[in-house]
Amino acid sequence: MTTNPSAELLDNLLTATGQTTAVREEVRVWSMSGVERVTFPDGSTVIFKYAKKPFDSEDQALRLAHTLGVPVPQVHASAVLDGWLGMLMEDLGSSVREADDLDGVAAAVILHGSRTAPSLLVLDQNRLRTLPTRALEHLERLRKAHRWQDTDEVEDALDRIAQAAEARSAGATLEPFGWVHSEIHPTSLHIGERGWRLLDFARAFTGPGLLDLASWHGTIAPPHPVLLRVFLEQYVTAGGTPDALAPRGGVTAENWALGWHRMWAVEWFMEQSIRWINDPATDPAYIKAVGRHLTDVLHLLEI
């Protein structure tokens, strides 16, 4: 499908919830998903979120998180159409302030302390150490499509990481191992009048919780192991497992977390490039990001 079926999805959801008309207002929209505020005739509002594969099971993750006592927005109704998910969710309104580091560790401690879902993809040591190999497979497919041609440096870096991956992925299942949100950033924590809610569960999986902690400061700025070490110590102080500070794979906890988080991002960028977005016009930006991350991975994992 070239167009997204958001209008039809919304109609289905309105019917399911007994509403007939609603006014849509865009909050944030990009090629693979969108968030809108929907206002009903009585003045009440909900959030309408829609997303295409592979983001089409967020409703299940949110419902499960809610059941397990993780503070998340409530899902009122959801539907799937032509590979697109649509959800009507609780409108949390405006946030009262931005989330800070202590909010981040509090959210991570609660999420990591909840039992994991059998339905979530598992990223254990076996799966983790295949990330560079999987990225090389994406690269091969991209090159067969006459894309990513001048990327020998990317290939060389992935080869080196693949060779070191067995040793460096050790300790993947050390605690905290379980529910990983994968995108815990200050922007995915909503601090409202009635406390906080964790948003954006579209890429949740079962795996090393350190990847969540490494995601907090984002990947735009260069990795900052000292900053992450402080964050890990705050996490332990807030009730997270002391094992979060333990070295793994022959490197410090903070280097391991930042290195593998960036390797995880690289594999995802490359899969997105060939499979989900598949738009050659985005190649220069992706190649640049991948190259930068791979340089970081080699440095952080001491390869």
Image (cartoon, helix red, strand yellow):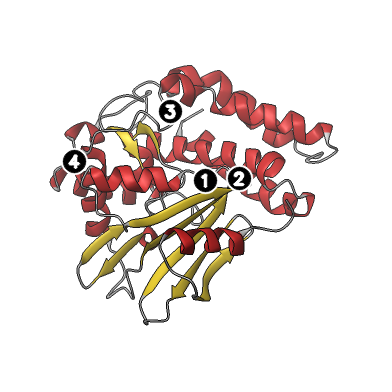
In the image shown, does 276 or 145 lie closer to the viewer? 276
Secondary structure, mark 2, is: loop
* 159 over 106 or under it: above or below: above
The CA span between labels 1 and 3 is 19 Å
User: Nearer the N terminus, badge 1 or badge 3?
Assistant: 1
Crowd tier of the residue under label 1, counting other residues whose Cα lies within 10 Å: few below 14, some 14–19, many 20 or above: many
User: Nearer the N terminus, badge 2 or badge 4?
Assistant: 2
The CA span between labels 3 and 2 is 24 Å
User: Nearer the N terminus, badge 3 or badge 2?
Assistant: 2
**Residue that label 3 marks:** 123
> Which residue sits at x=69%, y=46%?
287
Amino acid carrying label 4: it is: Gly
Amino acid carrying label 1: it is: Asp
- Indicate which disc residue 56 carries: 1
User: Nearer the N terminus, badge 1 or badge 2?
Assistant: 1
- Mark 1 and mark 2 residues within 8 Å of each other at the beta carbon: yes
The CA span between labels 4 and 3 is 20 Å
**Residue that label 4 marks:** 240
The CA span between labels 1 and 2 is 7 Å
Amino acid carrying label 2: it is: Gly
- Indicate which disc residue 31 carries: none
> Which residue sits at x=37%, y=32%?
206
* Residue 166 visible in the snapshot: yes
Secondary structure, mark 1, is: loop
**Residue that label 2 marks:** 83
- Mark 3 and mark 2 residues within 8 Å of each other at the beta carbon: no
